[in-house]
Amino acid sequence: MNIEQFVKRAKESHVFHEGEVADIDTIASSLSATRPLLYWTMELYDKDENNIKGGGGLGILAADTRRTAQQLGIPLILITPFYTLESHQKLDNFWQVEEIRAVHPGPAYRPYGSTSVSTAQHTTAPLDVFERTHGSTQIVAVTEKNFGELYPGSNNGDHRLYQEIALGFGGYKALKTKGIEAAYMQLNEAPTVFAALARLDDMLQSGASFETALHTLRTQILYTNHTLVPAAEGEFSRAQFDHFVYPNISSNTLREWVAGLFNAEHNLKLSLLAIELAGKKSAVSKLHAKVAHFTDRHGDIVEFEPVTNGISRKWILPKIEKLYHTSGILNEADLPSNEYLSHLRSLDMSTVRHLRQAGRNHLTAVLQRRKNQYGQATTIPDEALIFDFKRRFASYKRPDLLFQDTERLAHILVRHNAHVILTGKPHPNDEHMKHELQALLRTAHDNPALRERFHYLQDYDEEIGQALAFGADCALNVPIVGEEACGTSWMKDIANMKLLISTPDGGVADVQPIACFEVSGDNEAESLYSNMEQVAHILRDDESYKREIIRSLGAYLPVLSGPRMMAKYLQLFATK
Ligand SMILES: *Cc1c(COP(=O)(O)O)cnc(C)c1O
């Protein structure tokens, strides 16, 4: 596939409303290898293919964005740090301990030259740059031997700021040396904003007036926000800017302009900087665009364009993906075809059962090589149903909702011959959730039925995420409504014809009413349990199962499509 073919397919597609992607051919024809989309991200999660491990959804999205661009022939360079330390989870008596491993880019990466950033007192910090090319896309990674790990301490720390300027200023310089024109830049969250400052400073050096340069820059930059409220974000002090940021800016006017953005407490949130520098702003689901509450320097509310996240092919069992193509559900651009609903209705359930079994076999193999809460392999009988809960062990995602009534849970699992697999790490600094995890594992241990039917997988990663998407039967997604910006693991589940039990939050709420089993009401735990019972019945009956697949896939196939997301981003870049 090349970009022209993709543009043609997107413009013909019913996935988009009239005119929604009307201008993407103009941007497509102005992109090239030396004038690509520059995708800046502090996190990339693509260990399997590119040897870089991230922490969660932000990095998974970056990897999926690049992979989708490659598939569609879109020229894109993804610029990211290469962290030299990688964190893994282990359990000791159900208590999480982090194991830190030293890592290197490895032979798949080639040297891309060197760059540097400056800090106060005119010291220069040299940086190494590596690259790896995949079709129309390239990964450019900035690092040095003491670069450290992703999210080491606080969001406001000196080392974090150093990593951020290394990416933004260091990365910008490295690309410029190679003759890459930074005409279109996407900032995947605010901490990548230094790339935009570097660009503006560069424009000022070539003689543009500040107003003209800022105006031009704003037409070229898209800031993609993943946060709900600025309170959740890091901020930096004037002293930190003096030390790390200003030494990398040549223009006095620009330094003064930045200084004017600090608040009364002499701090600056990077989201404000991103809002002021980017003329285009997007949120990652419809609901997120509504609830994200950010203001610009004048105190005016910022409007975000909703571009719901999508996933790449990696998360769909290859045999299922093949079926989507042979049966005409997906077209060659991986967009749902204009007749996909009727093709979905003619799916044959014995084929579906056969494919689901192939997914289950994949999961069974992965469960053999990974460790559960007892440090052992996990074996689940073939006839048993599997519910999964796989996501960061964060309080708002509510991994504990399932354990509100342990007896009830145990009873459901026994009665329906079902198992639950839970996986996900508490943040290393989140003592509260580390205790929650330990308490939850003890509770399960003390209940004989749960000891047999409840499994916690250590060190949640792509392999586990993918295996559960391929092979479990039903996913549980119960964030507190209004707190999940989008979420993508539920998309992986729907794409593999699993059933989904969810609160109406994040990207799930793009479709109204939500097209899965809804957890709602005053007693959400009870709602979760009764949905689990209903799903258990449905999964054992072909006719009802098929009806649910048609309902969920029918509604969400356009939503979860990576190419749908890419077309919307191209449109945002094309819009004046
Ligand atoms: C898909 C995936 C995520 C993102 O999940 P959310 O639903 O956005 O929380 C995080 N980590 C891994 C390993 C994944 O595979």
Image (spheres, rainbow, N blue to C red):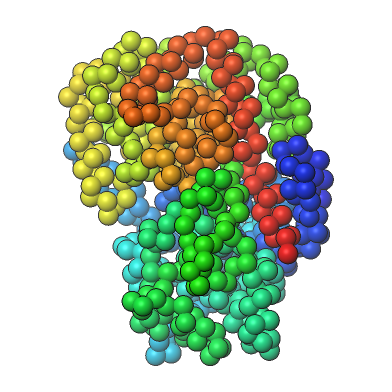
Q: Is residue 538 above or below residue 64?
A: above
The residue lying toward the viewer, choosing from 20 and 162, is 20
- x and y, in percent, of residue 443 in the image: 20, 29
- x and y, in percent, of residue 231 in the image: 37, 60
Identify the residue at image location x=35%, y=43%.
Answer: 396
Question: Total number of numbered labels?
Answer: 0
Identify the residue at image location x=74%, y=60%.
Answer: 574
Image quarter hosting the N terminus: top right
Q: In this view, does 67 lie above or below 390?
A: below
Identify the residue at image location x=39%, y=76%.
Answer: 263
Q: Can residue 320 be seen in this view?
A: yes
- x and y, in percent, of residue 380 in the image: 37, 19
Q: Is residue 460 visible?
A: no
Image quarter hosting the C terminus: bottom right
The residue lying toward the viewer, choosing from 166 and 213, is 213
Judge from the rendering whether residue 571 lies leftward or rightward of residue 314; answer left or right. Answer: right
- x and y, in percent, of residue 276 in the image: 55, 71
Where residue 451 sits, quadrant-wise, is top left
Q: In this view, does 182 lie above or below 356?
A: below
Identify the residue at image location x=42%, y=51%.
Answer: 55
